[in-house]
Image (tube, rainbow, N blue to C red):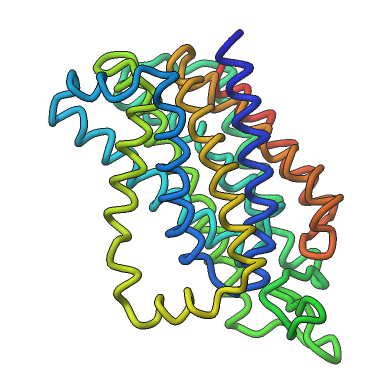
Amino acid sequence: MGGVAFSLLAAFFFASYLVLFRRVVVRTGEYTTAMLLMLPVGILYYLALMPAFGGFAPFASIGPGVAALFALAGIINMIGGRGLNFHSIRLLGGNRAAPLTNTSPLYAGVLGILLLDEPFSVPLVLGIVFIVAGATLISQTGSSNPGSMVATGYAGDSGLRLEAVVGRSEGGNPASVAAKVSFWEGILAGLGAGLCFAIGAVLVRYLLHEKFNHPLQGNIISYAAALATLAWMPFAREHRARLARLKRGDLALILVGGLIVSSAGFSQYLALNVAGAGLVSSIQATYALFLLFLSWFLNRRLEVFSMEVVLGITATVLGTVLVSL
């Protein structure tokens, strides 16, 4: 029961922060600054929680090899998975990126069969079919819904500038080759994010159950490793310029988003500590439904809402549940 509750909580937090992140991307036109700033926010948040979860004492019992694996999990999840997910959202929007990221249980199921000798079951086959169908529906939104619009940046302070990632240009002409490339780049980035999240979840599940039963401390190591990997960014001229241009309202959104996604990550680690990676992945897949609901109320002008999107999200959520049975 605890695994289900923590997984649902993580799903809601993930959806909430992606709604905020989508607005940040629209305002700033990029996502790497948000990735960087969210990490120290998360570390400070976890440090504030530590007195209630054993303090610093558990760190004394962790070996260097286990710490290195938690660091690897953080890099895979927070730089690989999160970075590719952010890139997919920038190109496709949150609604269309969500079913692609939700392919993570598909990868986990296949890896389990190939590497862990897990059984090849009927629910797994059906789940794969649903997940592939959902991702395929999303891949069709560019051609079957030529007027789909995705926000890419600001048109000054007065409003949002919307551009078609794949759609009709003026006069009804087909979209440019560059736009089509961007669309498929978003598709591949979403699928890549799903793969990274699957590998990270399996690794964290193994570490928490076999090596180090302290989710908060493990999460701090993961966050610190991800932050160390991106520590070069403030020293690069381009990134310093982006930080200098960041408006106060955008910074506030990033900081709030950092707190929310840190809550999501901690909830996920708590869920993996008491439940299997398959169960956690299947329940967390409902974040796509939360995202669809929240986007309708908060980001309606920034997202694509079509029958293909709704059916694609529904299919991938059903598929993840079946894969995890």
* Quadrant containing the N terminus in the rendered view: top right
Does residue 205 appear to the left or right of 295 in the view shown? Answer: left
Q: Position of residue 181 (x, y in %)?
A: 56, 74
Q: Residue furthest left?
A: 64
* Residue visible at 33% across and 52% down in the picture: 227
Tally of numbered discs: 0
Residue situated in front as seen by the camera: 146 or 80: 80
- Relative to 190, 192 lies left or right: left
81 in relation to 28, above or below: above
Quadrant in the picture for residue 203 = top left
Q: Is residue 191 above or below residue 116?
A: below
Which residue occupies 67% across, 70% down? 26
Residue 68 % position (x, y): 19, 36
Q: How far across and how far down the image is residue 261, in percent?
A: 55, 42
Q: Position of residue 11 (x, y in %)?
A: 63, 33
Q: Residue at x 65, y 85 (%)?
A: 176
Asked if one can make out residue 109 in the rendered structure from this viewpoint, the answer is no
Front-most of 187 and 287? 287
Image quadrant of residue 96? Answer: bottom right
Q: Quadrant of the C terminus?
A: top right
The answer to whether residue 117 is above or below residue 89 is above
Q: Is residue 145 left or right of residue 154?
A: right
Asked whether, in this view, residue 288 is left or right of residue 181, the answer is: right
In the rendered image of this protein, does residue 61 appear above or below residue 168? above
Does residue 81 appear in this view? yes
Task: Spot the residue most to the top.
Answer: 1
Residue drawn at (70%, 73%), measured in percent from left and top?
166
Q: Which image quadrant is residue 208 in?
A: top left
